[in-house]
Image (cartoon, rainbow, N blue to C red):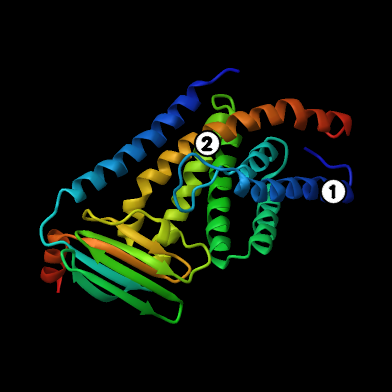
Amino acid sequence: MKIKIGDILILLLVLSVTVMTFLINAERSFVSKNMEVIIRVNGEIIDRFDIGSDIKKVYETEHGINEVVIQSGFAYISDADCPDVICVNTKEAEKNGDSVVCLPNRFSIEIVGQSEVEVDAISQ
Amino acid sequence: MQFRSKTQKIIFLSLLAATAIVLSYMERMIPLPFFLPGMKLGLANIITLSALYYYKFKDVLVVVVVRVFVTFLIVGQTMSLIYSLSGGVLSLLGMYLLVKYTSKWVTPIGVSIFGAFLHNVAQLIVLALVMNSISISINYGPYILLTSIGTGIFVGLTSKIFIDRIFSEVMRMNNVT
């Protein structure tokens, strides 16, 4: 089977875009001061906690039920009533930019570090 | 290619759609070495890609849309309908342009990698729109884009064999090429 020049070009293009997204992420995760866990339903922020806190809370929304646990610097969804339970099986969030998402329930938790919060304060 | 009659056209396109539906249902049963939410092999893309080499864009679009809707009826998750439809249509557009204008320099493998990549890009955009936050897509994007290279090569190789050994043979037997 022969591989032509165009295949290599496409592979390089896709690979470079992927590496670029990795670099953008690496830069974000260096920020590690005053990290907050932000809990969103349908894109709207409904709660925020410090990552250092020790919390177990159940959120009942119109889309479904999710239980969030924040413990020793990790945040994760411990229980949910969604059909696929992908959110429960997702790795815990610990670094800036990490997130756990529950699509059927429109529910997400995300860790946001200092820099983004500052930008928000200025733009207000 | 030219169809001899409308009936022949309907039968050929239905066969393609049926094969694609079975493939996209079967791929849920194949265990993968590691798991990312939303990650899959994209076996149905074998049909889309092979069909692009023989049929008009409009006909392949019909096959893709029928496949997405019937798979939605079998699996039954509303969100997956939006993801599959956006991903399927965008990757079809990209692959069509590659097949039409650059088929001298690009084999099905390259076309397939590009298609898998566009499929994931469309899904990341829809994810950002649904969750109303772009940071989740940016955070999750690199991993899912990396898998698209692997699955793209696999699907491309399979499509190449499928076109050479099966598709062209079926065409020859039916005298429709």
Report the label total. 2
Marks 2 and 1, how far apart at CA: 28 Å
**Dot 1: within a 10 Å radius of its alpha carbon, few (fewer than 14), some, or many (20 or more) residues?**
few
Q: Is residue B172 left or right of residue B64?
A: right
Circle on res. B152: 2
Are the residues under marks 2 and 1 on the same chain? yes
The disc numbered 1 marks a residue on which chain? Answer: B
Q: Which residue is mark 1?
A: B11
Q: Is residue B101 left or right of residue A110?
A: right
The percent coordinates of residue B152 (x first, y second) are 52, 36
The percent coordinates of residue B34 (x first, y second) are 45, 42
The disc numbered 2 marks a residue on which chain? Answer: B
Q: Is residue A111 left or right of residue B62?
A: left
A99 or B107: nearer the eye? A99
User: At 47% across and 42% down in the image, what residue appears?
Assistant: B117
State whether residue B73 is above or below residue B96: below
The percent coordinates of residue B78 (x first, y second) are 57, 67
Q: Is residue B109 left or right of residue A119?
A: right
User: At 56% across and 30% down in the image, what residue appears?
Assistant: B109
User: At 11% across and 62% down in the image, what residue appears?
Assistant: A34
Instruction: Answer with the quarter of the image where residue A54 lies.
Output: bottom left
Callout in the foreground (2, 1): 2
Residue B16 visible in the snapshot: yes
Q: Amino acid at mark 1?
A: Ile
Residue at the extreme top: A2
Instruction: Answer with the quarter of the image where residue B112 lies.
Output: top right
